[in-house]
Image (tube, rainbow, N blue to C red):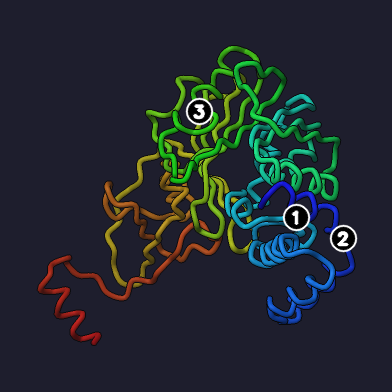
Amino acid sequence: MTPEQARSLVLHAQDRQVEEAARLLARGGSVLEARALLEASYDSPLCLAILDCLSCRERFAHKFENAERWLLTREAAEQASDSRISRWRAETLAEGSPGRLVELGCGLGGDTVSLSEHFEVTAWERCEARAQLARYNLGILGKRPCAVECAEADCRRLEGEVLFVDPARRDGTRLSRPQSWQPPLPTVVDCFREGRFQRLGVKVAPGITDGDLPDLPIGLSFLSVGGNLKEAFLLLDHSIDTYREAVLFTAGGRRLSFRSSGWEIPISEPSPGLYLHNPDPAILRANALDQLARHTEAGIVHPKIGYLVGPKPVEDGSADSFQILEAFPLKWKILKKKLAVLG
């Protein structure tokens, strides 16, 4: 989306014609019908921006709370966090923290809206179109005063109380090395290491390695939604001890957390009548399988295999459970015969 399209979209977001097009699509009308309705009042670039926004409201309704009130674009909405993650992250950053926060890379304002429930936010976004949409979204959905600056912030000169960064991890292709993110992770960590911020939170890729983590007390949370590992969150604060956890937002609407206690999981042989548990991937990334095992009264199939076996199914969304009907040695000849019987 161009800055001109974003500016026009903001200007006409609450027009009667836009609302009529939204209702038409909600009734099952076609995009062509909606476009014809809009073209009676607007030029082609604005019609495309409106249709993109309306399509995103439907497509990402699971991700954005009150999606019908947001101004969205496809690429930015795909990159945004689920609103449940954003709320949890804002609560985490706000624990015992002062009331002002600096945000780098606010995008459409998805995290900023949640952060505004706890902080007065100064947000930076280098994309002019996204910055304009973020200002609109915050004006409609934000709770406290927020300012959105359209510029490339210089991390080396930033100072404040709390800093939250969502670095750009794409530049035509996915940037896997944190040193290549914009801003680079080491540069962001220096904002905390040099004492310019009391607390730092960074949205990071869930595949981040231990070698990429700073040699400081950190909290590392792996976040899943509906059983899918979505992202990770790095927290730096001198008042915390180092930890690693899994935070699960289940399909049933629950929020669960798991941290390892160092408990040695007993070996449990699979046998008919028991249940095989496939853990949420966030639990495996957080090395918190031991807590799930205690929670479910289960044992582990093998120390190097992340499956558990227990007497009852897991029903809280932390694992998928399958009743064991038969157990036999994992040998190709035996497996081939079993599969032949099943057809």
Q: Are marks 2 and 3 in contact (CB under 8 Å)?
A: no
Furthest residue in direction left, as rendered: 333
Where residue 325 appears, as percent x and y from the top left, is: 31, 75
Residue annotated with mark 3: 184
Residue annotated with mark 1: 71
How far apart in space, not on screen, are marks 2 and 1 (Cα)? 10 Å
Q: Identify the disc placed on residue 14.
A: 2
Relative to 325, does residue 286 appear above or below in the rendering? above
Relative to 246, does residue 187 appear above or below in the rendering? above
Which one is nearer the viewer's eye here, 36 or 262?
36
**Amino acid residing under circle 1:** Leu
**Amino acid residing under circle 2:** Gln
In which quadrant will I find the C terminus? Answer: bottom left
Which one is nearer the viewer's eye here, 266 or 302?
302
**Amino acid residing under circle 3:** Pro
Where residue 8 appears, as percent x and y from the top left, is: 80, 54
Taking the image as shown, residue 99 lies to the left or right of residue 266, namely right
